[in-house]
Image (cartoon, rainbow, N blue to C red):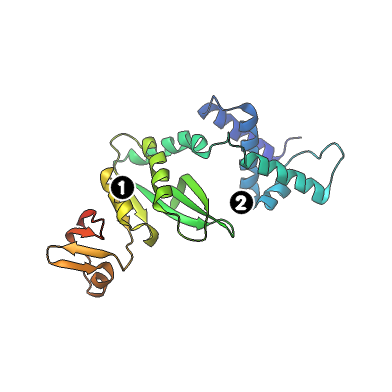
Amino acid sequence: MMTGITEIASSISAELKRRLPKQRKTQREKLALLVSTMLDVRSANLMDLAAGLPLEADRTGALGNAQRYMRYQWIVRLLGNALVVSDAVMEPFARDVLEQAAAGGEPLCLILDQTTVSDRHQMLMLALRWGDRALPLAWRVEQTDGAIGFATQRALLEAVAPWLPELARVRLLGDRFYGTADLIGWCQEHDWDYRLRLKGNLVVFDAAGKTTTGQCAKDRVYCLTDVELTGRRPHRHHS
């Protein structure tokens, strides 16, 4: 029997088939059903999803908690399937929205941000700023209670970079976790503009000597020209 969730899942499955014609049918239908359920329950919590997932009871007619556990295991197996690669699924959708965003000639504003997803896991996400919204493009999840490091940041950026329209200008936005010499250097190598919040303890080298970003803030110096940061000294024309 068709429900609202299964009807939406059917539409999502058709769109996945159009954009990913080589995707396996079973993977496509399961992924579409899970996405549709998430839209309905408005939660990423696996138990909430299990409660809303419109799957038939098993052959024994399991009900209540047992049936919910069966649905939970169905979700866990799908999410743990190494053949379901989020980058591959997101790429055609991301390319489409990036092309639309670049059509007006304005820079593509990409937002790098980290979110806590569980007691043990953090998610690093790269999103496109679209008006007042942030549209997720790709993400990485790591087991850590601190900031996800540059190696993962670089891997995420390098996964998305080939999706960008040719000749599109890019501006990377990031909070204080991302104002590092490594990330600034990466942006410069790829000719990306950047707006990254700097920590106050970064050393600033200029023609007059050296100071720190914190001291610059105290002195109300809001624009620096021809400076280098930290021992790595990535060159910055303006700061």
Quadrant where the N terminus sits is top right
Above/below status of 195 relative to 63: below
Q: Which residue is mark 2?
A: 44
Between marks 2 and 1 in the image, the one whose residue lies nearer the viewer:
1
The residues tagged by marks 2 and 1 sit, at their Cα atoms, a distance apart of: 32 Å
Above/below status of 190 relative to 117: above
> Would you identify the image quadrant in which residue 104 lies?
top left
Query: Residue furthest toward the top?
Result: 22
Quadrant where the C terminus sits is bottom left
Query: Residue furthest toward the bottom?
Result: 218
Q: Which residue is mark 1?
A: 186
User: What amino acid is at disc 2?
Assistant: Ala
Query: Residue furthest toward the front?
Result: 231
* Left or right, residue 25 beside residue 155: right
* Left or right, residue 25 beside residue 233: right
Residue 130, visible in the rendered structure: no
User: What amino acid is at disc 1?
Assistant: Trp
> Badge 2: few (under 14), some or many (20 or more) residues near its Cα, within 10 Å?
few
Q: Position of residue 39 (x, y in %)?
A: 61, 46
Q: Nearer the viewer, residue 119 or 135?
A: 119
The residue sitting at 58% across, 36% down in the picture is 82
Residue 117, visible in the rendered structure: yes
Q: Position of residue 155 (x, y in %)?
A: 41, 44
The residue sitting at 39% across, 44% down in the picture is 157
> Badge 1: few (under 14), some or many (20 or more) residues near its Cα, within 10 Å?
some
Q: Position of residue 147 (x, y in %)?
A: 45, 59
Q: Position of residue 235 (x, y in %)?
A: 21, 54
**What element does badge 2 sit on?**
loop
**What element does badge 1 sit on?**
helix
Query: Residue furthest toward the right?
Result: 60
Above/below status of 227 relative to 214: above
The residue sitting at 28% across, 70% down in the picture is 214
